[in-house]
Image (tube, rainbow, N blue to C red):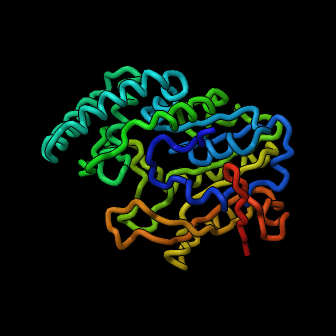
Amino acid sequence: MYKAKPFIKWVGGKTQLIGQLEAELPADFDNWENATYIEPFVGGGAMLFYMLQRYPCIQHAIINDINTDLCTCYQTVKNEPELLIEALYDIENTYHNLKTEEERKLFFLNVRERYNKKDLDAVENTTLFFFLNRTCFNGLYRVNKKGLFNVPFGKYVNPTICDPNTIRRDSELLQRVEILNGDFEVTFDYAHDNTLFYFDPPYRPLSNTSSFNDYTKDDFNDNAQIRLKEYCDKIHRAGHKFMLSNSDCKGRNKEDNFFDNLYSSYQIERLVASRSINSNPHKRGKLTEILVHNYLNTKAKAFNGNYMMHVGNENILTRFV
């Protein structure tokens, strides 16, 4: 069967970290009965699609994001995959038939202007979202203070705009998912027995020029990070499990203990990540991220640091120290 994967590019996507993230899941997660999985900041959904394929114990899944256009994409992929595929093929063929870069740039700018008018139905809005995501600079999603998409043209020669296999497979998995659009705290009422939350919020910037928080017109600042921690406390008191990713500020500045202090009452791990989307190619490469969770026994610890991760028909040994 075709493997599901994120249908869009998304800054901070977790595809490259899946093995490390799975190793930090609760050790007995495979044996949870009637499990509920909740992502309050779904973004590109790499972890979501992996978890839905890997763990049949997940009977209920809830995703949420503050970005309305992104949530519309998920709804459209779930409910109207064939109409979306047809529309994406149309815009892909039109774009690829343009002969010059200047023609393509003008087409891109016209699509961006149309998208920003916000008077589209769900299929057209998602079609233009996909197109802009595939053809804009570095696949970024960024809006200004008015909420308007403002990423420039990307100059790709032959981008794939329509990937029907991914859309159809993702649509199948999303039939098991309830899609919310709002503040992350709206997800609490959907938690039941055996619930795991995975948080992948907008990351705290490592410098004044490295912010990728512009997914919406509202900033996710330090006050929001503190409110998120207090929400994690609420989840913990209710007896649910959570896992949370964020930037490792201490990795860039040893004096920056923001997250180490904020989450001092929980388990804090550090994972090695690759930054592949950056306007400055010299700043792309390896860095560490933090992973916080409120349980002691993880899969990696249960297997003494050697965890066999299942990907498709293959077994991949992941070692942790």
Please identify the quarter of the rendering in which residue 24 is found: bottom right
Place residue 39 in its image quadrant: top right
Classify 134 as above or below 167.
below
User: Relative to 186, does residue 17 appear above or below in the rendering?
Assistant: below
Whole-percent x, y for residue 122 in the image: 41, 23
Q: Nearer the viewer, residue 190 or 129?
A: 129
Quadrant in the rendering for residue 121 = top left
- In front here: 132 or 42? 132
Residue at 53% across / 22% down in the picture? 79
Rendered residue at 86%/38% (across/down): 33
Residue 305 horizontal side relative to residue 74, left or right? right
Q: Is residue 231 left or right of residue 32?
A: left
Q: Position of residue 263 (x, y in %)?
A: 67, 62
255 or 250: nearer the viewer: 250
Q: Is residue 279 left or right of residue 29?
A: left
* The C terminus sits in image quarter: bottom right
Q: Position of residue 90 (x, y in %)?
A: 31, 27
- From the viewer's perspective, tell me whether residue 107 is left or right of residue 132: left
Q: Residue at x 79, y 60 (%)?
A: 298
Tag count in the figure?
0
Which residue reaches farthest bottom? Answer: 254
In front here: 309 or 1?
A: 1
Residue drawn where x is 68% and y is 34% of the image: 61
Note whether residue 16 is visible: yes
Is any part of residue 231 visible from this angle? no
Quarter that holds the N terminus = top right
Could you say where residue 279 lies in the image, as x and y percent from the top left? 32, 62
